Structure formats: C-alpha cells, structure tokens
Image: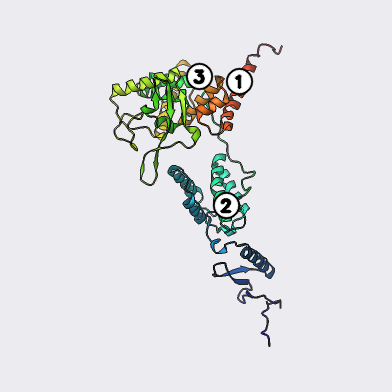
Amino acid sequence: MAGKKRADNKGRILCTGERQRPEDNRYLYRYFDSTGKRRIIYALTLSELREKEKQIQRDLQDGIDISRSDMTLNQLFQMYMDNKTDLRESTRCNYISVWNNGLKDSVLGNMKIAQIRQIHIRSFYSELVKKGLSANMVKLYHNLIYPALELAVDSDIIRKNPAKDAKKGIGGTKKERTAMTIAEQGKLLDFIKGSDRYRIYYPMMVFALSTALRVGELTGLRWSDVDLKENIIHIRQQLIYRNLGDGCRFHVQDLKTEAGRRDIPLTASARKSLIKQKELSLVLGTKQRKEIDGITDFVFLNSLGNPYAANAVNFMLKNVVEAYNRSERATAAREDREMKLLPHISAHILRHTACTRLAESGIDPKTLQYIMGHSSIAVTMDIYNHVDTARVKNEMEKAEDVIKYG
C-alpha cells in the first residue's frame, strides 16, 4: 500500500522536497545543488515556493552554479580584481580604494549576488547623486560593479547582469572644467614672478601653461626627455606618489594610454622656462637627493632635492592664490575699487587653461588632441565647444555699437 501523500494545512498535496512548517506555516523546499550540497529555500505561500522551485530547476538545467550564488557583491568584486591581471598597480589601488570608501560597508556590497536586482543598484547610484558625487564618480562605480557582475554571468553563477542599464537616467553633478581667463593667467604669473617667496616656481608654472602636461607628466619630466637642440620634449612616463603596498612613496610609471606617449615641440616660452629652471637649480645648488626607480635627473625639484608630488603642486597653487587675493583685497580697499580676485587654481586647471589657449589660437583639433595626449577626440572637442561659445560672445560684443536702442 502506497504511503500517504504529505499535504499542507489546506489539504493540498505537497510534492517531493516540499514541506509546511507547523510552527509558523511557512513552506520550504529541500533540494541538492550542482555540487551535491543540500539546500533549503523558504516561502510564505505554496505558489511562491513553486515559482522559486521552477527557477531552481531552470538554473540547474542550464548549468547555473547556485552553489556560488551565496557570495556577496564584495566577495565577487574581490574575485573580479584577483582575475584582472591587465591593471597597473596604481589603477588597482585606486579601484580598491573607491570600492572600500563607497561600497564595502553598504547594503549593496553585502548583498548576495543572487538577490541583487536592478532596483538595488539604481538605488545605490541615486544615493551617490544625493550625496553630491559627480557624474564621473557615479560612472566609475558603475564601471566597477557592472564587469564584476558580468564575470558572475559568464561564470554561470547568475543568469543575467542586474547592473545592465542600471545607470540610465542617473545623473550626478557635472563638474565644469573652468579655464583661467587670459587676464587671470597674466595676474597669476605676474604675482609669482614678483614674489620673493614664490618666484622659484615661475619657470615650472610658465612651462606647465606652455605645454599643457598632466601633473604627473610635468613632475615626472627628466632632463633626458628634454632635447633643447631639436627643441622638443619626449613624454614617456609619469611620476606618482602613492601607496602601492610598499608605503607612500614616489613611483615612476608608464603612461596610461599609448596616446600619452608623445613628442611636444617647445614654444619660445617653454624653452626659456627650462633654461631658467636649470640656471635656478645651479644657483640654489639643488640636486636630486636620491634616485627614484633608478632615475636621478628629474627637471623640477623642490628645495630639499625631491620631485614634486601632485598634491604638493596643488598646495603651492592654493597658497599662491590665497596670497594674491590677500594682497588684492588690501590694494582694492586702499584704491577704493572693486576687487579682482583669482579663482581656485589646481594643476588640472593649469592644463585645461593651456589647452584652451591653444584652441583659442586656432590650432586644429587633431593636432591639439595629440599635444594633450587625449585618447578620444571627443575630449578635445569639449574644449573647442567652450572656446566657440566664448568666441561668439566676444564677436557679438563687437556689434554693440551697430544697433542702439534710441
């Protein structure tokens, strides 16, 4: 005689593996995953349980590795980074830092990947926007989350990537790149040149505004990269000051992209600034104190004989601007006129300003793309769009006297 079929409290026959718990009436289903491990799922209703059963059977049939779907997004990211062997160490450290700062302790970071849905990721991005993060930072988080989950899809751990299209409609504050005006650029250089304290930075500032180098390319420039005979500099490396697992120290690194490797002809101002920098180093007796990754001939050194870290350049610019503005406030009050203060200036703004001046001079976009080391022409064209807007405004101002309101 066949055994009695198990039923729930409503008399419905339960299938193999199904059961209703008498203590709370919840339903459960026992099964074996692809590794032979026994697993249990729960549901409040029988219909909900059977929908979950269908998904499980579908996953098992399609080879989805349910045994690993219990890992969290944090664990998946670690797996992704362990298998990402084409990253430079500085980039790897940056990615891990970004993840640890914003995702590691979040609800999303600690969710099991099998439970993550698009709404969870969209909610995370929306929270980033509410916190005031830039559109680029939101994009960076997406560029870490999406490929990690794609690895899980490709490894048959989850069926589809919940991060797909999750960023659509999610913005973020867009930081406008603001170049100095010609007048501001002139005030900055004049102040540095005339300052007893800051004039030692004058050659470096003129060189930065003449070449549009990235700060790491500027501080990482070597005398062996300078050819004054042919009037050209060779951009071949960058200098960073980072902790790459060996404590905070200087590291010489290859450029991020092939477009970064370029030879830039020197303008008269750039050439003169290099000559003055060499003279200044001789007068001050400045010599590089110790080699960095085998290199001992960096062009720009501080008074201690060390190259400049990027944050040191930015800190110097901050001090210069504050000193100028203090002087300008006092002078404007004494002369009873409106103050003309300098805005915030960083090493990146120096580069952007130099790029803008080159665009304003009429240099063609492809040449400017090469000089800047941009991988994409779209980045370069953003500069031209800004310059064109300013140029149209200036041209329209010339027409002020053509038609006047009587």
Q: Position of residue 387 (x, y in %)?
A: 58, 24
Q: Position of residue 327 (x, y in %)?
A: 42, 22
Q: Colour scheme used in the picture?
A: rainbow
Q: Secondary structure at mark 2?
A: helix
Instruction: Return the mark for residue 150.
Output: 2
Q: Please name the residue that numbered disc 1 is placed on.
A: 391
Q: Secondary structure at mark 1?
A: helix
Q: CA distance from mark 3 to mark 1?
A: 16 Å
Q: Nearer the viewer, mark 3 or mark 1?
A: 1
- In the picture shown, does residue 15 fall above or below 196? below
Q: Is residue 272 visible?
A: yes
Sooner in the amino-acid sequence: mark 1 or mark 2: 2
Amino acid beneath label 3: Ala
Residue 326 vs residue 53, the one in the foreground: 53
Q: Position of residue 80 (x, y in %)?
A: 50, 52
Contact between labelled residues 3 and 2, with CB atoms less than 8 Å apart: no
The image quadrant where one finds the N terminus is bottom right
- In the picture shown, does residue 63 fall above or below 405? below
Amino acid beneath label 1: Arg
Q: Residue furthest bottom?
A: 1
Contact between labelled residues 1 and 3, with CB atoms less than 8 Å apart: no
